Image (tube, rainbow, N blue to C red):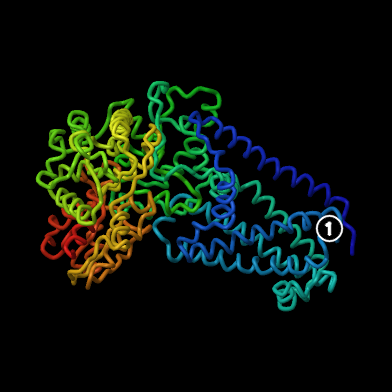
Amino acid sequence: MASVPSWVPIALTAFLAACIGIFLHRLWYVVRLLRTGKAREKRWDHFSERIDALIVLGFLQRKVYRSLPVGVLHSFIFWAFVLLGTSVVEITAQGYARGWQLPVPLALNGPLYFAQELVAVLAIVGIGMALYRRYVVRPKKLMHEGFLDATIVLMFILGIVTTILLYNAADIGLRGSGASPEWKPFSSALLSVSIARLDPALWWWVFWAAHVALLFSFLAYILYSKHSHILFALFNAFWVNMEPKGAIKPIDLEKTETFGVHRVEQLSLRQLLDGFACTECGRCTDNCPANATGKPLDPMRIITNMRDTLLEQGPAILAGKTDGLPDMFQTVHSEEGIWACTTCYACVYECPVMIEHVPKIIDMRRHMVLTEGKMPPEAMETMRKIEQNYNPWGIGWDQRGKWAEGMGIPTLAEDGHDAEYLFWVGCAGSFDERNRKVTQAFARLLQKAGVKFAVLGAEEKCTGDPARRIGNEYLFQMLAKMNVETLDKHGVKKIVTACPHCFNTLKNEYPQFGGNYEVIHHSQLLAELIDGGRLKPANPVAKTVTHHDSCYLGRYNDIYDEPRHVLEVLPQIKTVEMGRCRDKGFCCGAGGARMWMEETVGEKVNHRRLSHIMETGADIVATACPYCLIMMDDAAKTKNVDAQLERADIAELLERTL
């Protein structure tokens, strides 16, 4: 084999030094920007679980496959990079010593070459699928200013995988059996049909140079493109949130000088990292109920604009000269869009690279509420009612236990000392006229099953969920500490509640304030009582029922089966699923304190959800959440399908059959 011309190593060294230098210079700059994040998060705990997350979420990319066609085409491209990476050293070294090979046992060379060939071809197929999707299908979520950058990246990858096949073909033509043609079927085919008549020595150099040039030029470009996620998404996977999904990080109100965030450097390193891990796939925005119904909320923009703001303001931030710079409400997202969020968690749940949108939205709300004193007028009135009467309805706190009159239900303060469960009724179950019927139905079921339970009555206060989600952390912490004190005073160990918002707060957030209890949802307890034979459905329902998944029960707490189990055991019932159900469900529109804000822009979220329900042809929509029931009731009455569609909690349907 011919020796390497003397000028090639010199030119190659200079080129590699330039490309690697550009890459490292940009990487160091990004790392410096990430380290400006002032907030601190502990993300080194649960180390073994984090390694598992790195493998499953990072390398195996489990969440990418939630969209199967996209997951397949992405896997073709991803695995091409992984396996072709094994050839980088060997091929680059040809510019210094022709014929040099990695010291890999000969038995592994053949299968490795075949794997490289296969994934190169699959990558070409994947790129073709990706280009077809972008230029022919043109989904709305991909039609943004990152479109050109994505095309450039795809062209780079196409060039890299194509030149490796052409290089291998020329190598086979030059070295014959020494190039292991039997393990390179696609390159051998290229040699036979296209370049067999060409001078293999010349074309060997052409394709080698093209491959190396494309490969290292891409390395230099990558951190300036959206494909920075190739590197940073792996860190995102390792530093994935290991706390309960439904727990918002608390603020130390005594030590914190500023509340919430309005500048990018006030975010944590992990939050800033999200911007560079973002693939700009648009799944978060595509699954956002607020965006889908015409609200000015774009979860992807929050992340990409945060990254762009950090890059744009980076020199000033690093120099400590941030006075006069526009804040996040000017450069990242509008206040109106931030208020539109229902905190349904769909954006976080669907993101393939573990980006956390909701905590950033809550932090921006905290700044508006606690620092600037801003919130929608109707929400301000709701906060006032909670402060005065400990519930969003503003009804006198002493009326909280009125629903139980004549039912013989004890309170913990009176004679509930032997109760197995505290029934946490919640504000909706106590004060909303429609949901009082659910509360009474569930209480009667517990009595019929012989479950010993008690309530707090007038001692119960709002858990603070609406206050925390709207950004009023001060009010939330006040309520949480008062409730924990009451629960601990009575020695409460086990709590059951029919409200997913109360369930999530009591179970996942009260431990932040020393309140550690065994908390279950009423759907879980009902399913347990049915399976244990303590509740025996007998009377037929003879209706078609579809179940609406509560976001705070489903995506936040992974409870999907128990409500369905309660429905499926009802005699003569027929259950049907909506197209968007379980972890792909669509929000009712009440979460994130949206229950207490007017919805004046675009279509109402609950109206869109009602359309999903009506498509099933169901007679009844079953819920397991008082907020969802209120929203479904409102939508059915507003859209004049009140008589056509019944709305009921699973406890009410179960009680009918006993």
| Residue at 18% from the left image edge and 35% from the top image edge | 458
Question: Taking 319 as reference, is 63 above or below it?
Answer: below
Where residue 116 sits, quadrant-wise, is bottom right
Q: How many marks?
A: 1
Where residue 333 sits, quadrant-wise, is top left
Q: Which residue is mark 1?
A: 103
- Badge 1 amino acid: Pro
User: Quarter of the image containing the N terminus?
Assistant: bottom right
Q: What percent of the width, then of the height, locates residue 598?
A: 20, 42
161 or 593, nearer to the observer: 593
Is residue 141 left or right of 571 when viewed as pictured?
Answer: right
Q: What percent of the width, then of the height, locates residue 352?
A: 49, 53
Question: Taking 30 as reference, is 345 above or below it?
Answer: below
Question: Taking 183 as reference, is 367 above or below it?
Answer: above
Is residue 292 left or right of 210 when viewed as pictured?
Answer: left
Quick check: can you spot residue 542?
Answer: yes
Q: What percent of the width, then of the height, locates residue 193?
A: 71, 78
120 or 537, nearer to the observer: 537
| Residue at 58% from the left image edge and 64% from the top image edge | 76
Quick check: can you spot residue 631?
Answer: no
User: Quarter of the image containing the C terminus?
Assistant: bottom left
